Amino acid sequence: MPINRPYGGPTELPGILPLFPLEGVLLLPRCQLPLNIFEPRYLALVDAALAGGRLIGMIQPDPQGGTGRRHGEPALTGVGGVGRITEIAETGDGRYVLQLTGVARFRVRAEIDAGTPFRQAEVDYSAFAGDFTPGLGAEAVDRGHLLRTLAAYLEANKLEADWDSIKSAPNEALVNGLAMMAPFGGREKQALLEAPDLSSRAEILVAITEMSLARTAGEGDGPLQ
């Protein structure tokens, strides 16, 4: 989805982001993430984002990392994805329904105590400068292997897909879209997020899917989570 404010590189993004920790969710560049916001602290986060640069940092909690800076809340993973609010609607019952469009990944430098009900962190984008170039590395993706693995997974789990849309999708949209939609756990999702390039992400996605298929075959029928 086109956005009104394109970003050409890391220096065009803020050094501090409001954070929305959400397990099993990742946001990749130029992909869309729908959100239904109803908790008061995240309603406040959206209001703050709208008053500023319309940017929200999506990040996973890290239950294995102990307690974060805010007492009683889990630590956060080291890498997240920042998105811009590109669609928003008020529901009339105290919720926001919005869509984020991914801009780039970021690395958390330090969580800060900003006195807000939502969490914030100092972030750095320099390790992910390639995220600002659409389609970078798309030619190196083994598209055939990815599609064959996807077809096997759908067949094993008795799922259907819009193959016309899948076959017409550019490699970047295909790989990143599948990575975001894949029904895998938080650790697998984080590995997909932190992949150094698009072809590596496709390879990780294939490997995770093939392991899921192998476990499914070993346990009989039924999808694996």
Image (tube, rainbow, N blue to C red):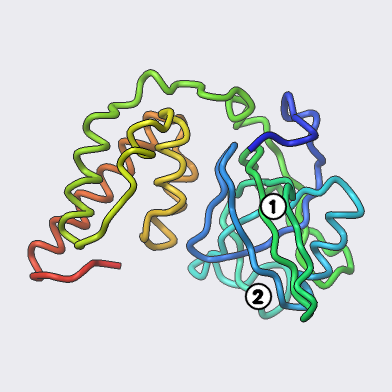
Disc 1 on helix, strand or loop? Answer: strand
Looking at this view, name the residue that lies furthest to the right: 51
Identify which residue, 98 or 117, lies in the foreground.
Answer: 98
Identify which residue, 38 or 218, lies in the foreground.
Answer: 38
In the image, 35: left or right of 166? right
Q: Quadrant of the N terminus?
A: top right
> Is tag 1's residue or tag 2's residue first in the polypeptide sequence?
1
Q: Amino acid at mark 1?
A: Gly
At 56% from the left edge and 71% from the top edge, which residue is drawn?
66
Q: Amino acid at mark 2?
A: Glu
135 up-or-down from 107: above or below? above
Q: Pinpoint residue 132: horizontal percent, then vertical percent.
A: 64, 27
Residue on which disc 2 sits: 73
At 40% from the left edge and 37% from the top edge, which residue is drawn?
175
Determine which quarter of the picture holds residue 206: top left
Residue on which disc 1 sits: 57
Q: Pinpoint residue 214: horizontal percent, then vertical percent.
A: 13, 56
